[in-house]
Amino acid sequence: MYYNPYEIITNETNKNMQWMKSNFHMHAGVGIKGDCGEFPMREVVDAYAQAGYKVLAVTNHNTHIPYATERDDISLINGVEYSHIAHMVLLGTDRFEDINHQEAIDRTVANGGFVVLCHPNWYWENREHWSLEMLEQVTGYTGLEIINMGAYNPNNWGSGSGLALDKWDYLLTAGRKVWGFGTDDFHYWNDMDKAFNMIYAKSGAYADVKEAVEFGRFYVSTGVVELERFSFKGGRISVKAKLAIPTYSDTFEYRFIGTGGKLLYEVTGRDAEYMVDPAERYVRVEVTVDYGAKIYLQPVLNMRYFKI
């Protein structure tokens, strides 16, 4: 028995659903030069809307700044970045409370929100934001940022890496159902549109966004690569990518990753297939176009090891 988060996209009865470009971690509207979120809220939201985003959460550090108006061109959801040592974004809430991590997760979830752990491999004051021990200690979060492009901006503080595939694979191998998220963690204009999530939902309304996220109906992208097709039948994964902007490139590198982060199979072509070994706890797929843009798909889960 397996769980395929993309099964619904092949269901003909769900054609009223759509792919929506989204960002769940960014800063704006604080208005203090040199501080996180120094740029005006309206200017930042306008820029994201013009870049094709349909869902956006402005998540300032330990505070929520209300959006001035509702908009027709982009759905704005509430959020706060809980920023005590190990950061996490609390989505679907406008409240910050000075409590410990587990309490913050529990209260956010109890009030209808969801939580994503931020940049696990980004170092601050010589320590990583989320060590393996810390990841094991907290529960109830929906996922973690597997790529945070803001970590690579030299204007930002800290060191380490914005990539956290190692910790994602560690948690999945341990039987923890966590989804991978991507963000550009916007602080400065040159952060914008570096990594995002493509979610498959009925609408941009918060309830629909939350449903899609909790069931893993999204993937992470760092550019113009898109998912064209994904199926899982008879134990076989079939996947095909495409480019949002047609170019000479029509082939991709497909990498199938399994238990422990092990590379199971890789191939270059227009599409790819892989027969899943029943011993694998999960299989996830990474797709790369020749000039480096990537998508990271959520894993197909072996339900002998996971609970949904």
Image (cartoon, rainbow, N blue to C red):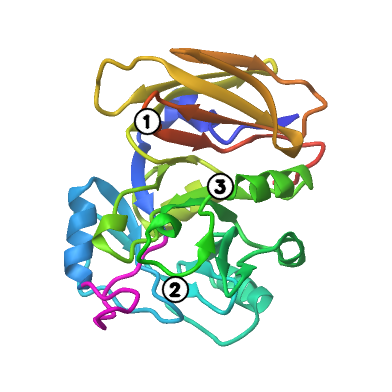
The answer to whether residue 224 is above or below residue 159 is above
> Any magenta on residue 177?
no
Residue 280 in sight here: yes
> Any magenta on residue 36?
yes
Find residue 15 and report its image quarter. top left
Callout 3: 10 Å neighbours few (<14), some, many (20+)?
many
The image shows residue 285 at horizontal and vertical percentages of 57, 29
The residue pinned by badge 3 equals 180
Q: Which mark is residue 191?
A: none
| Amino acid of disc 2 | Val
The answer to whether residue 41 is above or below residue 186 is below
Q: What secondary structure is the stretch in magenta mostly built from?
A: loop
The residue pinned by badge 1 equals 225
Q: Earlier in the sequence, mark 2 or mark 1?
A: 2
The image shows residue 168 at horizontal and vertical percentages of 65, 47
| Amino acid of disc 1 | Val
